Image (cartoon, helix red, strand yellow):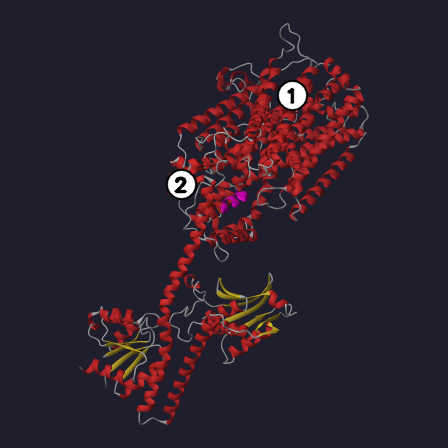
Amino acid sequence: MGKEQNPPVFLERRSYRQRRLMDALRLLPLVGMMLWMVPVLWPVADTGDVPPIKMSQAITYVFAVWLALIFATAGLWSRLNDVSSGNPSDDDAETTGP
Amino acid sequence: MASLNLLIGVCLGYVTLLFGVAFVAERAAARGKGAWLRSPLVYTLSLSIYCTAWTFYGAVGYAARSGMEFVTIYLGPSLVMIGWWWVLRKLVRIGRTQRVTSIADLISSRYGKSNTLAIIVTVMAVIGVTPYIALQLQSVTLSLSIFADPSGATDGGMNLLSAGFWVALGLALFTVLFGTRNLNANERHDGVVIAVAVEAVVKLIALLAVGIFVVWGISGGITETMARIDASEIGQWHMDRSRWAALTVLSGAAFLCLPRMFQVLVVEHDDERHLHIASWAFPIYLMLMSLFVVPIAVVGLDLLPAGSNPDLFVLTVPLSQGQDGLAILSFLGGFSSATSMVIVATLALSTMVSNHVVMPIYLSLQGEGATVSGDVRSVVILSRRASILIIIALGYLYYRISGGSGALAAIGLISFAGVAQFLPSMLGGIFWRGATRVGALCGLVTGFTIWIYASLLPSFGTDVVLSQSVFDMGPLGINWLRPQALFGVDGLDPTVHAVLWSLLLNTGAFVVGSLVSFPTPLERLQGAQFVNIFAHSGHARGWSASVAESEDLMIMAQRILGAREAQDLFRTEARKQGVDGHLPEPTPDFLQRLERELSASVGAATAHAMISQLVGGTSVSVQDLMAVADESAQLLEYSSQLEAKSSELSHTALQLREANAKLTQLSVQKDAFLSQISHELRTPMTSIRSFSEILRDTKRLSGEEKTKYASIIHVEAIRLTRLLDDLLDLSVLENGQVSLNEATGAMDDVIDHAVATTQAGGATLRIARVNGPVRVMVHTDLDRLAQVFINLVSNAQKYCKADVPELTIELREEQGNVEVYFTDNGVPIPNDTRALIFEKFARIDDQDGSGAGLGLAICREIMARLGGDIFYLPMTNGNRFVVRLPQTLALAAQ
Amino acid sequence: MGKRVLLVEDEPNIIEAITFLLSREGWHVDTHSDGATAVDKVRDLAPDLLMLDHMLPGKSGLDILTELRSDSDYAALPILMLTARGQMRDRAQAEEAGVSRFMTKPFSNTEVLNAVRDLTYT
């Protein structure tokens, strides 16, 4: 009885696309974390011979990452909406969580 | 220069405006036009209570002191929002299905509805948030003092501490008025949410306005500003690496754990789609809030004399340029930040305090627990108000003790570290089924103790709580217990040190405690439900319900939910179960639903305790235990299809059971029918035969005796005739062969006629009439209707055994029906015979020979023919029969 | 003083008829119309004959019969049972419980008198 309800091994194209979009959405915070931890590696004022990063550059970097993440999230979200419209159930994507 | 009085006037005007907005919003919500209140935009804006006065004033000060580090406070929440799929989605779903009212409720509910945990979390939250509230007081008073004494050099303009007191009092009143005007069943506050959203807009505009003024008005453009930044004293990248990483993580954790954030993220909203939009919209808000922080800090450092408080640059920079209007806008922004934070934070905390501390104590003091009479809602509101006052008073106390001197950012971080202690138990609870109550208790207590010792107590300064020697040498000279260098780890930044040790040991204790302890069945069920919330949004635990009396549950529910709401809930459930009347069967499903409704008002642990008190015994059945033991069985059980089918089946089964019970009773009735009819016919026949034989066979009878015996024969013959009439009448009615003589007449007249007919013999029954305001006309068979009334009145005459028998006849118009209530003051018909009274020959008192037991059966048939209805309602001391005619029959006559 | 009969019956007109009939035959007729206290009444009066209706308020005739027969003092008491229900099962049950005579209403006066005589003179 349970066997018949198992999802098929291969999905049709649309659900496949939808799942990969979800994957990307799930990965975003990890990407963001990595990018925002880059400043930890930057040379600082008091140490060594490498000249420290300028404040203006730091600001630009942090805010650029911020904007990129926001655009990526919003973009992925609206793509996902487009893909799943007409296919109202995105439950399968939900139940296949980690 | 804006005067202090003008400023206070502006504040009051602003607060009035907020009240207006909140009022309009609540009115709209009450009238069902509140859809816009639940839009993704409002959700996103309400999240902005993350940005408090600390953000508004403190971020600039923070930047002026430590450069870019301030931004970590916003990076953490941005990541959490962008990663909504991982944690927030689950929290919101759990919050919705389990009706969670606060973070304490979530944790206690997850770990087997433990009230101990709820109390611990509540106390921790109150202590953890106290510095944060103090911070708001401090920033509002500081900003006021700037206007009182623009030089900012001395405190001379006003007494900061007394000003703090007035600000605290004002905030407390504001919150009480705003948040506890009524008790909302689901802990939502539409008015508050919308006011918070307005304040979010105000503070964003204020900060952006100052930023734009600084960049384009003072510095002269973006390029120039950047150059100015690079040339300033914070122009080079210098940072504490450990702090950068630790604060990002800490702020993310606090974003999830702060009681006020939990309130707006989870409790006030339940639409998961809003989360999708907020996942990118809220990072935009955070980014905009931090965009101009560094420029303002740099310009402030440049323009203002050395020694000016950088925490107030947002105000002092416009003031120094003569921009009073901008400064007032900026002040309003800061004021908004502080007020919105205090309102939501104290609301969230007061809910926790009242649900988890005050109500359990109150209910246990009441002795009988769940069954005391009276409405507890006023108690709930009172306890919430008192909690709000106490929490703000604590904030003020902290402000006084800490001297109101620390930098805003430092105080904020202490709070963050405190509430972050909830994180292991919360995340562990929703991701790991093995997490147990003991583990959560160990983790929370360990983490919190370390936080108090390493972070909170040192924050008061040396020699206030902890002496200098403790800092230097450790307590009792134990070196490795120094509060800022635990286990000999020296040289770490104090904040990082406290966060690292408290969270590390917290998590460790949580994991070890969970591994070595064994959870109770309830914990395991809740754990399975929380962790697999998406696999089955059903409900795992079952009440074994047979002992619970629906009436007791009703009484309890009325006290907590309010009479109307409780009755609606019960009626809906009864209809769903397919049961007649107002009281549903206490099925496990219904009990669970009721428990969730109650938990919204008094918290999960209390609601659970109250229900289990009424239901009695253990709440986990053998089946539940088997389900826990066998996980695959559990999966099957929860597959939604099966669930739907089984609920359908149980619904049908219930109907079948009812039908079957009725059939069995009817068959007994039918069996008795022959005996009955035989008895009813033979009894009068016996007298007739016997006396006619006496008259025939006895020679010497006096004339008097002859008359007497003849009249007995006569009376018994009439009795026989009446019985046969009734039987015929009934069979005609039952076969639908009756023809109705419809006419129009006044209901009152029909009742009058019935009363006159039955009272003709000078009966002892007192009859009182209650009529509606208008004369109700009906178009129906008036004679048949009168027959029904006569039957009911004469039944009351026969069966009402009160000392002073009394019958009240009341005419009402209700929901499109005309209803006539016949209420007597006799002994209520026993429960087991109620279902049968409308059946043939069903006499309540089995041997009362004066009637054949056909009257009510006839009444029922007549009312069915007339398109109406007759039914019975038990009263506490009496019986009520209701005759109902549809209004259409009445309207046709007018 | 003639013999005593106790009539346990709740229909006033039937009581009247039987009282009339038996009085004329020289019986002393006591009547009682409550089932619940009927057994006590029997113990009080110690009648020579008991006439028992089947359907009584408080306690059924069959129960009263069973209770009396379980007491050795009344094992031999002639008991005439009257019923208006006319069900075969009732008769069977009553006979099993030890009734002396079972009659269905309506009865002819002669029938009743004969039955009473049978039960008390033979």
Q: Is residue B792 visible?
A: yes
Q: Position of residue C5 (x, y in %)?
A: 26, 80
Tag 2 subunit:
B
> Above or below — where is A97 with respect to B591?
above
Q: Position of residue B12 (x, y in %)?
A: 74, 38
Disc assigned to residue B624? 2
Instruction: Please identify the quarter of the rendering in which residue B754 is found.
Output: bottom right
Relative side of B305 to B850, left or right: right
**Residue at mark 1:** A65
Q: Is residue B596 magenta?
A: yes
Q: Is residue B393 visible?
A: no
Which structural element holds mark 2? helix
Q: Is residue C91 magenta?
A: no
- Say what amino acid the circle numbered 2 marks: Asp
Same subunit, labels 2 and 1: the answer reads no
Q: Main secondary structure of the magenta part?
A: helix
Q: CA distance from mark 2 to mark 1?
A: 50 Å
Task: Kindly check if marks 2 and 1 are in contact, taking CB atoms under 8 A apart as contact.
Answer: no
Q: Give the residues in magenta.
A: B593-602
Q: Position of residue B510 (x, y in %)?
A: 46, 27
Which structural element holds mark 1? helix
Location of the C terminus of chain B by quadrant is: bottom right
Instruction: Please identify the quarter of the rendering in which residue C67 is found.
Output: bottom left
